[in-house]
Image (cartoon, rainbow, N blue to C red):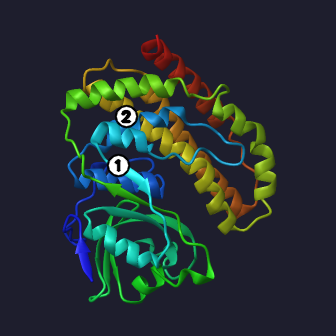
Amino acid sequence: MSATVFGLNAASYTPHELHRSERVWLETNCYVDLWIELLHTMRLDPVACMAFTLAMDFEGDQWTFFKQPAADLYNLYGVDVQELTIWRPVIDHVVEQVKNGRVPMVEVDSFYLPDTAGVAYGVEHTKTTIGVETIDLRERRMGYFHNAGYFELSGADLEGIFRDETASLAPYTEIAKFDRLVHRSEGELAAMARELTRYYLGRIPCINPVTKYRARFADDMTWLGGEEMAVFYKYAFATLRQCGACAEMASTFLMWLSKHGGDPTPAADEFASIASGAKAIQFKIARMMATRKPVDVTLLLDQMEASWDRAISDLVTRYAA
């Protein structure tokens, strides 16, 4: 009826510094943010696994929804991520996996998540992913990782989260297994992260992703200008937030790498510039939506495009040789 993995308390939980510092993008996406807090809880450095952010791209209708690759999590920390087959009520699987010392990562409806108050909680039905750490069916209470921290829900919200799935498809669910967990030294992590940097530099897009984005930007603005603000929020999350948050995380990763045996690289500042540029464009579009007046972001896109070129050129020179 009840189980916990780490015995956390939402009232006393302290988020990782990535979710406490004065960052341009305090939140990234539900998956990356969840893993930042989950690794932090196990006293593992979540920045060490961020080399994959260097391969950011524009996918045509959105920027890459960047996620920590399962292979990187296993190789760096010994954390094993596996998909969970849902063949019983989801809550039954969640209870069993938590009892086994694992964290189930489940797609749920933000409508029932108290930490999204003011955005989705009790207002809008949107999909997101949480990591269940504690569940108590007798007390109708659940503790979970989501976005920038660790939270708790209870009562009707618990029932809403695990509503009857017979009327819809079962949610996508993974489990994080910690049987082979390993705490490596900072030096060992940095050495492995440098190798991952070389690997992901081999996967960078062939065309500057900002160049691809700006090629359709005018059409996007023409279309968006006739939509409601709610559509803008979805557009901004899929495009500018993923671009900016990924770029800022790439900058953070490169600065971490330089502190642990690597040479300081101007690429860190270039990615930070992309992150700031994406936030500035988002603000300008929000203003356009409010005033219905066109905005000019040419200079910002010029700067972001040039920053990506300079960053990649520097990194390839340093690591790909």
**Mark in front: 2 vs 1:** 1
Residue at image position (40%, 28%) is 196
Task: Decide: is 112 above or below 6.
Answer: below
Looking at the image, which is closer to me, 279 or 139? Answer: 139
Q: Is residue 301 left or right of residue 89?
A: right
Q: Is residue 92 left or right of residue 41?
A: right
Q: What amino acid is at disc 2?
A: Phe
Q: What amino acid is at disc 1?
A: Asp
Mark seen at residue 253: 2
Q: Position of residue 13 (x, y in %)?
A: 22, 65
Q: Position of residue 287 (x, y in %)?
A: 65, 57
Q: Secondary structure at mark 2?
A: helix
Looking at the image, which is closer to me, 46 or 78? Answer: 78
Q: Is residue 20 left or right of residue 8?
A: right
Mark seen at residue 199: none
Instruction: Examine the rendering and report whether any part of residue 88 can be seen.
Output: yes
Q: Secondary structure at mark 1?
A: strand
Toward which corner of the image does residue 212 lie, by quadrant? top right
The quadrant of the image that shows the N terminus is bottom left
Task: Decide: is 58 above or below 92.
Answer: above
Task: Decide: is 277 above or below 311.
Answer: below
Mark 2 Cα-neighbour bin, 10 Å: few <14, some 14–19, many ≥20: many
How far is the residue under mark 2 from the one under mark 1?
22 Å
Q: Which residue is mark 1?
A: 80
Looking at the image, which is closer to me, 225 or 104? Answer: 104
Mark 1 Cα-neighbour bin, 10 Å: few <14, some 14–19, many ≥20: some
Residue at image position (27%, 58%) is 15
Q: Answer yes or no: do the residues labelled 2 and 1 have beta carbons within 8 Å?
A: no
Instruction: Examine the rendering and report whether any part of residue 26 can be seen.
Output: no
Toward which corner of the image does residue 136 lie, by quadrant? bottom left
Residue at image position (65%, 34%) is 210
